[in-house]
Amino acid sequence: MLRSLARSSAIRRAALLSPLSPHSPPPHTLLRAAAAQQRWLCAEKKAAEGEAAEPAAEAAEPAAEGAAAEGAAAAASDEAEPADRVAELEAQVADLETQLKEKHDRMMLGLADADNARRRANIDVENAHKFAVGKFAKSLLDVADNLGRAADSVPEEAIAENEQLKMLHEGVTMTSTMLLKTFEQHGLQRVDPLGEKFDPNLHNALFEVPDPAQEPGTIAHVQNYGYSLHDRVIRPADVGIVAKR
């Protein structure tokens, strides 16, 4: 094709430069012929280019289809990847919630145990303060009993006849009264259950006595008073109860 173009150009130059002869065609005729030949060469060039482009287009169609398929697969993969990621994150959230619940339960159990331990400690401290004097007070109960027995053992006639005995009796009675008041200030109470119903948690039955005027099980005699420290019995009362009929 390039050779044809070169030949056409040479013809045109020759037509323009060659001397006119009587038998040669006119110059404008030669120019027309050269132009027609050039148009024919251009048409052949375009046809050749079209024929070369058709195989290229045919070859590009499968490539375009492959690219479209690859794009669709990539799009499907992109759509599937977020779904898988969401499922993975949901599983992680469920696992973390389970761990959180377990740790919350353990924390609540630990707090409950700590609260119970604190309450038990407070109760122990309170009981220690309340009953710290229990053993000491219990050891003084015999002293109180002996003072009461000493005051009750003096006959009223002897007290009236003897002034010194009267003063001694008053001193013993005052000592016993002050001792009982001191007991009360520290939570120690004397219990006199005479006439009450027998309670094995508060009383110690030593004997039974017949008494038709009272119901069976009634306390008819108190040999030793009972004592309680802050509502806790530290010594039950020794009593005699009415026997069953």
Image (cartoon, rainbow, N blue to C red):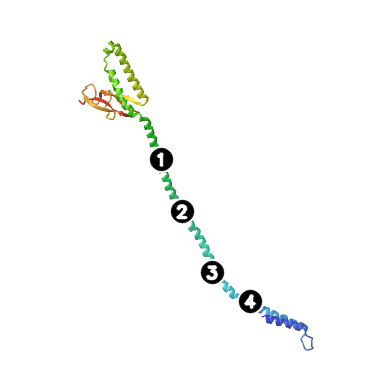
Q: Position of residue 40 (x, y in %)?
A: 68, 80
Residue 231 visible to an observer of this rendering: no
Which numbered circle lies on residue 49? 4
Q: Name which residue type carries label 1.
A: Ala
Q: Name the side, left or right, on which 142 lies relative to 80.
A: left
Q: Position of residue 203 (x, y in %)?
A: 27, 27
* Cβ–Cβ under 8 Å for marks 1 and 2: no
Q: Position of residue 125 (x, y in %)?
A: 38, 33
88 and 234: which is toward the camera: 234
In whole angstroms, how far apart are the C-alphas of marks 4 and 3?
Answer: 26 Å
Dot 1 or dot 4: first in sequence order is: 4
Q: Name which residue type carries label 4.
A: Glu
Dot 3 or dot 1: first in sequence order is: 3
Dot 4 or dot 3: first in sequence order is: 4
Q: Which residue is mark 1?
A: 114
Q: Name which residue type carries label 3.
A: Gly
210 and 77: which is toward the camera: 210
Quadrant location, the C terminus: top left
Crowding around mark 3 (Cα neighbors within 10 Å: few <14, some 14 to 19, many 20+) is few
Dot 2 or dot 3: first in sequence order is: 3
Q: Residue furthest bottom?
A: 23
Q: Which residue is mark 3?
A: 66
